[in-house]
Image (cartoon, helix red, strand yellow):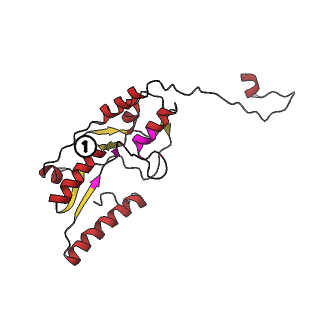
Amino acid sequence: GGLGKSQSPYAWSKAANTELVRNYGEWFGVSYVITYFYNVYGPGEIAGGPYATVIAIFKEKYKHGHPLTVTSPGTQQRNFTHIEDTIDGLLLAGEHGQGDNYGIGSDAAYSILDVAKLFGREVVMLPERRGTRMQSPVDTANLRALGWTPKHDLAKHIGEFVSKHKDVKPVEKRILVFSTTFYPIGGPAEKAL
């Protein structure tokens, strides 16, 4: 924990919480396991609000026929982990793990743009956001040493979703032209019509 902790308030708070758990364990002799989740997807994922997942957001946009939006540059890499693999990792770490650095994540990294393309829908690029991590490397060595391996594949999951919702058509695009010029003076917008 703590890699890039000054990149954003979110990263800083995660690092501070990890440090608190470590210190509490040392101060009071309490056994602990610190796990790290990597973009959990699957049943129960959150599609709206500040804790929405990228996969759930893409699914909602797809179901409503909207283009998928990706924050520029789109090359930011993430590892995605199915909820069932995450639960298996938590149970194993909780039962047999000790200490820090139990990453629960798939080894396969995807760019956010590549994930959007798996849906086969139009992609609209949004402006870059300050503090966006370009990579989020996964270290699963401690959990794998306990016998954990992910069983689910993101591309297959998205493919099954798209097949189930294949009848959803993209929303028709409409263009609104608004002009502030007054008759009889015609501006570029009027001339374009």
Residue 44, given in percent of the width and then of the height, sits at 39, 46
- Direction bottom: furthest residue: 27
User: Alpha-carbon neighbours of circle 1 within 10 Å: few (<14), some, or many (≥20)?
Assistant: many
Numbered disc 1: secondary structure: loop
Quadrant that contains the C terminus: top right
Could you tell me which residue is drawn at 47 percent across and 48 percent down? 129
Q: Does the magenta stretch include residue 44?
A: yes
Q: Mark 1 points at which residue?
A: 106
Q: In which quarter of the image is residue 33?
A: bottom left
Does the rendering let one see residue 124?
no
Could you tell me which residue is drawn at 75 percent across and 23 percent down? 191
Quadrant that contains the N terminus: bottom left
Q: Looking at the image, which is closer to me, 103 or 113? A: 103
Question: Which kind of residue does numbered mark 1 sit on?
Answer: Ser
Q: How many marks?
A: 1
Would you say the magenta stretch is mainly helix, strand or loop? loop
Q: Is residue 124 above or below residue 32?
A: above
Q: In which quarter of the image is residue 152?
A: top left
Q: In this view, does 165 lie to the left or right of 176?
A: left
- Direction right: furthest residue: 184
Q: Is residue 42 left or right of residue 35?
A: right
Residue 34, given in percent of the width and then of the height, sits at 24, 61
Q: In this view, does 176 lie above or below 151?
A: above
Does the rendering let one see residue 32?
yes
Q: Looking at the image, which is closer to me, 154 or 175? A: 154
Could you tell me which residue is drawn at 46 percent across and 51 percent down? 130
Q: What stretch is highlighted in magenta?
A: 36-58
Residue 126, given in percent of the width and then of the height, sits at 50, 40
Q: Does the magenta stretch include residue 123?
A: no
